[in-house]
Image (cartoon, rainbow, N blue to C red):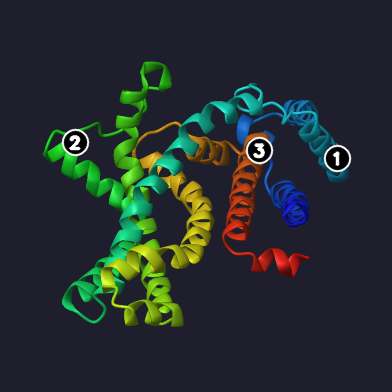
Amino acid sequence: MLKFVFHRLVGAVLTLAAASVLIFVVLEVLPGDPALVMLGEGARPDTLAALRTEMGLDQPAVVRFFAWIGGLFAGDLGLSHTYGTPVLDMLAERCLVTLPLAGFALLLALPVGVGLGTLAAALRGRLPDHLLMVLGHLGLALPSFWIGILLIMTFPVSLNLGSAGGFPGWQAGAGLALAALVLPALALAVPEAAILARVTRGAVLETLGADFVRVARAKGLSRGRVIRRHVIGHAALPVVTIAGLQFGVLMAGAILVERVFAIAGLGDLLFNAAGDRDLPVIKGTVLLICGVVIAANLLVDVIHASLDPRPRSAAS
């Protein structure tokens, strides 16, 4: 097991290193002058040159890359060109919003998706199965930000329930903070629950056709008892895998949902930094999201290996 985890950890580090190179190349080599964006088209050439020097844009791209990588190892992601604030401090503040939001959405989606998928598999071919699959297709088709708009129009506007946006901060109390995240988390959770329902249905149906299930049924166990005691545990592997992979999708989906609900998270930070062409903030935010996705995949691999010994055997 330790050897398997070590191999996966090395792979995760190499993946993150490759992601850092790609992020730098895409952002630093693409056309566009951050200094010109900040000062405007009417800026004097000497003022532009001075700002480029201050921002380090007059140095070769290779020098800037290794300076950025050296800062990563030192825990220094540079200063925001727009606010003059350390990027690491900005990311740490916004992570306290986006990570709980994505985790909350996953906690909402898991029981709903797994429950509906299991129910659809148990009632395969019947009317509830068809209805649940239609709802699943609908959940997959609707974007999270549009669901968020519908939730705002329904609850805060029409029913006067909950808040239409904003985040009071954790210092206001966990209850108020979580209440502010309910609607955005629900908007993120609907497509996620639809995906999990489809994956769960397929996994349960596949497991129902296994030999040990037929043996259990031959011994007189009811269909419901077989599903609860034997099927769900064996069908959990693909569900766990998809849930871990979808955490990265939730992080990405939070970018638009945070804008809809006026929540100052990583998505809002990245959106504003892109408009200002604040390269240190963009690079730091994208690299952080990549790191979270890679860490989630690593955790999924470890959980998968603990439930199923075959990946460990293959690694050995």
Q: CA distance from mark 1 to mark 2?
A: 49 Å
The quadrant in which residue 171 appears is top left
Number of residues whose C-alpha sits closer than 10 Å to that of mark 2, classed few (under 14), some (14–19) or many (20 or more): some
Q: Earlier in the sequence, mark 2 or mark 3?
A: 2
Q: Position of residue 130 (x, y in %)?
A: 22, 76
Dot 2: what SS?
A: helix
Write down the residue under mark 1: 66
Q: Secondary structure at mark 3?
A: helix
Q: Which residue is mark 3?
A: 284
Which disc number belongs to residue 83? Answer: none
Q: Is residue 248 visible?
A: yes
The residues bearing labels 2 and 3 have C-alpha atoms spaced at a distance of 34 Å
Give amino acid for label 3. Answer: Gly
Which amino acid, mark 2? Answer: Pro
- Compared to residue 149, the image places residue 79 above or below, namely above
* Mark 3 touches mark 1? (CB < 8 Å): no
Q: Which is more toward the observer, 175 or 240? A: 240
Q: Which mark sits nearer the N-terminus, 3 or 1?
A: 1
According to the picture, the residue beneath numbered tag 2 turns out to be 156
**Mark 3 neighbour density, 10 Å: few (under 14) some (14–19) many (20 or more):** many
Q: Residue at x 65, y 28 (%)?
A: 88
Query: Earlier along the polypeptide chain: callout 1 or callout 2?
Result: 1
- Give the percent coordinates (x, y) of residue 19: 71, 52
